Amino acid sequence: MPNRLHQQIQFILEIDRLKQILRQTLLTDSSRRENSAEHSWHLAMMAFVLAEYAPSGTDLLQAIKMLLIHDIVEIDAGDVSCYDVQGNLDKAEREQQAANRIFGLLPPDQAAELRALWDEFELRTTPTAQFAAALDRIQPILHNRQTQGHSWQIHNVKQLQVMQRVAPVEVGAPELWGYVQQIVEECIAAGYLASV
């Protein structure tokens, strides 16, 4: 087997491990926790379906690529609740190391391309990355609404924490910001999320 193909196959086999990384979020039917591969697929579909709400200058294909790879680092770094202060202290360092190792499995040109996409997503300085990040913040609140605030309640999350977490939606998908605020208000009214 040519070395390039061998490297590509090794990467493909390695990223299968993302299916084993369980997130805090339940599936919308509350049957089990979502895994990170399912989350990434769901976000890529959201980008396709909600493309009309992307800000000017967004490259949809690039956003979909970002969403498909943004959590690959969790294979090594694990999934930590965004509300876990202690668990997030060294998260960036763990994820950088994971990105180096996992993307480094690929041939150099593909490793550089995927790493650049991942870095762009993390920095959120382009309209494309901001749109992708906005969708990454919207999906969990949709799941929490459907599961009566399951992950919010097990982590004792309050309204202010959720609003800080979803704040990137205001820039990354401004047309969806009012909808996000409405969901949060509905969840408070239903008792799924504590206001204080």
Image (tube, rainbow, N blue to C red):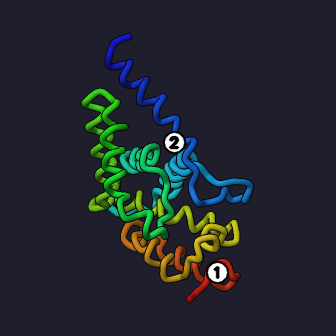
Kindly report which numbered mark, 2 or 1, lies closer to the viewer in this rendering.
2
Give the residue at mark 2.
18
Give the residue at mark 1.
186
What x and y, as percent, mark residue 184?
57, 78
Judge by depth and name the residue closer to the eye, 5 or 77: 77
Judge by depth and name the residue closer to the eye, 23 or 130: 23
CA gap, disc 2 to disc 1? Answer: 32 Å
What x and y, as percent, mark residue 63?
39, 51
Task: Determine which quarter of the picture holds residue 164.
Answer: bottom left
| Depicted 110 relative to depicted 189: above or below | above
Q: Amino acid at mark 1?
A: Glu
SS state under label 1: helix
Judge by depth and name the residue closer to the eye, 144 or 176: 144
Q: Is residue 123 left or right of residue 144?
A: left
| Depicted 48 relative to depicted 179: above or below | above
Q: Amino acid at mark 2?
A: Leu
SS state under label 2: helix
Q: Which mark is residue 165?
A: none
Identity of the residue drawn at 47% across and 51% down:
78
What x and y, as percent, mark residue 89?
37, 65
| Depicted 106 relative to depicted 3: above or below | below
The answer to which of marks 2 and 1 sits earlier in the sequence is 2
Residue at the farthest front position: 86
Quadrant in which the N terminus appears = top left
Identity of the residue drawn at 65% across and 59% down:
26
Identity of the residue drawn at 67% across and 85% down:
189
Q: Is residue 45 visible?
A: no
Q: Is residue 86 visible?
A: yes
**Crowd class of label 2 (few under 14; some 14 to 19; many from 20; radius 10 Å):** many
Task: Determine which quarter of the picture holds residue 141.
Answer: bottom right
**Crowd class of label 1 (few under 14; some 14 to 19; many from 20; radius 10 Å):** some
